Amino acid sequence: MNDEEYVGTGRPPTGHRQVWIKLLWIGIWLAFMGAPVTDLADGGHTPWGTALGVLGLLVFAGAYLVLVFRHTAKALDRRLVQSALAFLGALAVTLSLTLGTAWLVLFVYVAVSVGATMPLRTARWLIPAVTAVLVGIGLTGDHPREIITALVFPALLGGFAMTGVRQMIRTTIQLREARATVAQLAANEERLRLARDLHDLLGHSLSLITLKSELAGRMLPDHPEQAAAQVADIEQVSRQALVDVRSAVTGYRRPTLPGELAGARTALAAAGITADVPAEAPDDLPEKPEEVLAWALREAVTNVVRHSSARHCTVALAPRQTLDGRVLELTVADDGVGAAGTDPGNGLTGIAERLATVDGTLTTRPGTSRTGASGAGKGFTLTLSVPLGSGLGSTE
């Protein structure tokens, strides 16, 4: 069994709120402690027995919480995990044999701890083994059979449920890491494309400039007029190369709707806002209107993330027929505080100026349009439209 298998199922909490949430999810199993607590409160044991029972229960609960909380945040050493589980098992056996039927429930916690900390191939036989010990101790003593039967299901369910939770969280983490890897690969591919395009753009021009420079250098002493002609050619080639480079750079810097839609999904998800964003944009959009809408979408989503305190945001793209012709309408609606986008310093002025260059329009209103009903003054909706040429924007 490798040390790598003893991995935490999540990440360490980064704040007090996350600590309490994590303790709540782990401590929810403490509801089963009602039986031992009731047994101690009934006074059926000697004072020494009650005192030792209280001490044993506190030690057991503390060890369980520390083991599961620490290990699911950051993997503990394999030997430490095994020692802690052995301690919990031994304490459960001791308390069950000495204090009675109510204490058999401790084996449920042992099974849950196994599911939360042990590798799957170990947990899938160790959890039934813990349950078998529970049943064995229950059958050896004078314990009601219905209580033993009632504890078997929680022990098995609790243990295997924790293994399922571990696998789900681990898969989520792997997917997050895979997405980061894909983003890195996409960035690398973009760098390669930029390098390839620049090579194609400048390789021939620079080679020609080098060749003509050498020719001009050789002609200068004896043929100044021919050298001047070569220099003029060099100037013309270099100017054309500069125009090509500027055009290429402008194309790389120009935002696109598909790229901004993907960026909107990422930004809203990172801010904890439920996002309803289209997966695709209409095809064959004119370059300038698409650029204007892309900039506007970026600014609108930034405002939602920074200022709205919203829980939900909807982005919609829809071609529409108006009296003035076909337009592509972009709507960004949130259910936040209702003030997002009202301050002139938030970029609305810039959006309106960009829209004016393509004869587009901008409207704003309080309230949500697609995210559901909201109270008065709650939410904010931004609607932009740009005209489309004939035959464009046919995707409904």
Image (cartoon, rainbow, N blue to C red):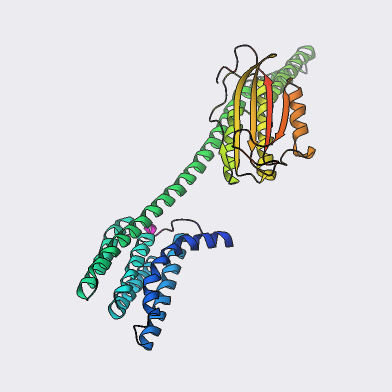
Residue 19 pos. (x, y %): 54, 62
> Left or right: where does residue 390 sit relative to residue 155?
right
Residue in the image at 64% along x and 33% along y = 332
Between residue 391 and residue 83, name the one nearer to us: 391
**Residues drawn in magenta:** 1-10
Instruction: Note whether 92 is above or below 363 in the view shown.
Output: below
Instruction: Note whether 240 is above or below 88 in the view shown.
Output: above
Residue in the image at 71% along x and 23% along y = 242
Look at the image and say whether residue 171 sits in the magenta stretch.
no
Instruction: Note whether 77 is above or below 295 in the view shown.
Output: below
Between residue 256 and residue 41, name the one nearer to us: 41
> Left or right: where does residue 379 sit relative to residue 174?
right
Between residue 40 and residue 61, name the one nearer to us: 40
Choose top left, top right, bottom left or bottom right for residue 57.
bottom left
> Left or right: where does residue 274 sit relative to residue 382?
left
Residue 259 pos. (x, y %): 59, 31
Q: Quadrant of the N terminus?
A: bottom left
